Amino acid sequence: MTDTSLNSGAAAPGGIGFSEKWLSVWVALCIVAGIALGTLMPGVFGFLASLEVASVNLVVAMLIWAMVFPMMVNVDFASLRHIGDRPKGLLLTIVVNWLVKPFSMAALGVLFFEYVFAPWIEPADAQQYIAGLILLGAAPCTAMVFVWSQMTKGDATYTLVQVSVNDVIMIFAFAPIVALLLGVTDIFVPWSTLILSTVLYVVIPLVAGALTRSWLIGSAGGRDNAEAAVSEFTGRLKPLSVIGLLATVVLLFGFQGNVILGNPMLIVMIAVPLVLQSYGIFAITYAAAKAWKVPFNVAAPCALIGTSNFFELAVAVAISLFGLHSGAALATVVGVLVEVPVMLSLVAFANRTQHWFPKG
C-alpha cells in the first residue's frame, strides 16, 4: 500500500503520519461522496467511464500513476546487494507473499462468496468479488510497509531489501499467478489486458521511479545527501498521491452507487474475508518467524509486508480486466477501507509481543 502522507515529511519514528492514521476515515467519506455524486450526476460519471483506450480508463490510469510513482521512487535496487543478509526473514517474505497469500485469498473468496454468502449474492456477482479478492491477494505491499516497519522499529535496510525483491518478483509472477487463480475460479482471463496492466502499473512506474531516483542521487552532490534528496522529492509528491487515491475511491463508488444502495451489507460481506486473510497471514508469518528465531526487527516487518496489499495495482488491474462498474473493482477498493485499522491493530500487537523474539 502506498505511503500517503498529506504532509511533506515521513511519519515520525515510532509514530504514524496524520493521513495514515485517518486514511480509513478519508476513504469512508469519499465512499459516501462517490455514491452521492454518482446518484446526482450519472451523466458525468458515464462520460468519465467512456474515456478509455484498450480497456484502460485514462482518468483512472492517471490517478493510479499519481499514487504509484512516488512509492516507486523510494525503491532502492542497490539494496539488493544485501539479499544474502539474514536470509530467514527474506525467505519467509517470499514464501508467504507468493506461495501462500494469493492462494489463501482465493480460497477464502470461494468459501464466502460461493457458499457462506451464496443466498444473498448472484453467482455472476460472486465471481467478480472473488476476482477482486484474488487481485488483492496477489499484490503484496510495496511502500506502506515502510510506515509499519518504522512503527515497530524494524530494520529499515532489511525492509527495503524485502520490498525490492518483491517488486522484482512481481514483474514476472503477478500476471501468471492471477491468471492461474482466475482460471481456477472459472473466470475468463484476457491475457493481453492482464499483461498490459502489469506493464502499465508495475514495469513503467518502476522504471520511471528508478530513473528518477538515479537522477536525484546524481544531483545531490554525494551519497550523504542522496537519501535526503529522495525524501524531499517524494515528500512533495505525497499530496498528489493521496489526492489520486481519494479521487479514485470517489470515481469507483460513483460508478457502484446503485449496487451498494441496493445492498448496503455488500461492503461488510467483502470485508469479512479480507479481515480474516489479514489476521491469518500475519499469524502464520509471525509464528513461523518466532519458531525460526528471527530477530524482532526483521520478523515484524516480514509479517506486516505479507499482511498488507499493493491495492493500487489491484484496483488498476481490476478496472482494466473487468471495468469500472465491476464487482472486482469494488472489492479492491473495500481493501483500502479495512486495511489501515487492521494494520494498526497488528502493529500494536507486534510491539506488545516483541519480547517473544531475539533482538536484532
Image: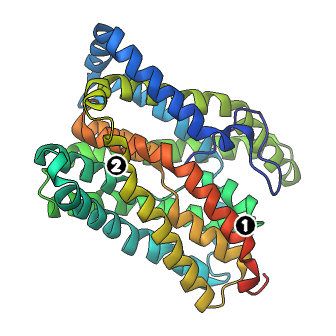
Taking the spot 76% from the left edge, 82% from the top edge, the residue there is: 355
Quadrant including the C terminus: bottom right
Choose top left, top right, bottom left or bottom right for residue 164: bottom right
* One can see residue 319 in this view: yes
Nearest the eye: 302 or 226:
302
The answer to whether residue 289 is left or right of residue 111 is right
Which kind of residue does numbered mark 1 sit on? Thr
Colouring chosen for the image of the structure? rainbow
Question: Depth check: 48 or 218 in front?
Answer: 48
Disc on res. 237:
none
Q: Is residue 194 above or below residue 255?
A: below
Q: Is residue 196 above or below residue 77?
A: above
Which of the two residues, 122 or 106, is positioned nearer the viewer here?
Answer: 122
- The residue lying at 88 percent from left, 53 percent from top is 224
Secondary-structure class at tag 1:
helix
Classify 192 as above or below 319: below
Q: Is residue 66 visible?
A: no
Q: CA distance from mark 1 to mark 2?
A: 35 Å
Q: Which residue is rendered at x = 49% and y = 44% of the image?
A: 336
Q: Position of residue 180 (x, y in %)?
A: 21, 63
Q: Where does label 2 land, which residue?
A: 270
Which residue is at 77% across, 34% downward?
A: 8
Instruction: Tell whether 159 sits left or right of 98.
Output: right
Q: Are marks 1 and 2 in contact (CB under 8 Å)?
A: no
Q: How packed is label 2: few (under 14 Cα within 10 Å), some, or many (20 or more)?
A: many
Q: Could you say where residue 341 lies in the image, as x and y percent from the top left?
A: 58, 51
Could you tell which of marks 1 and 2 lies nearer the N-terminus?
1
Per the rendering, the mark at residue 157 is 1
**Mark 1 or 2, closer to the camera:** 2
Instruction: Please state which amino acid type lies under the numbered disc 2.
Output: Ile
Q: Residues within 10 Å of mark 1 (few under 14, many from 20)?
A: some
Q: Position of residue 109 (x, y in %)?
A: 27, 59
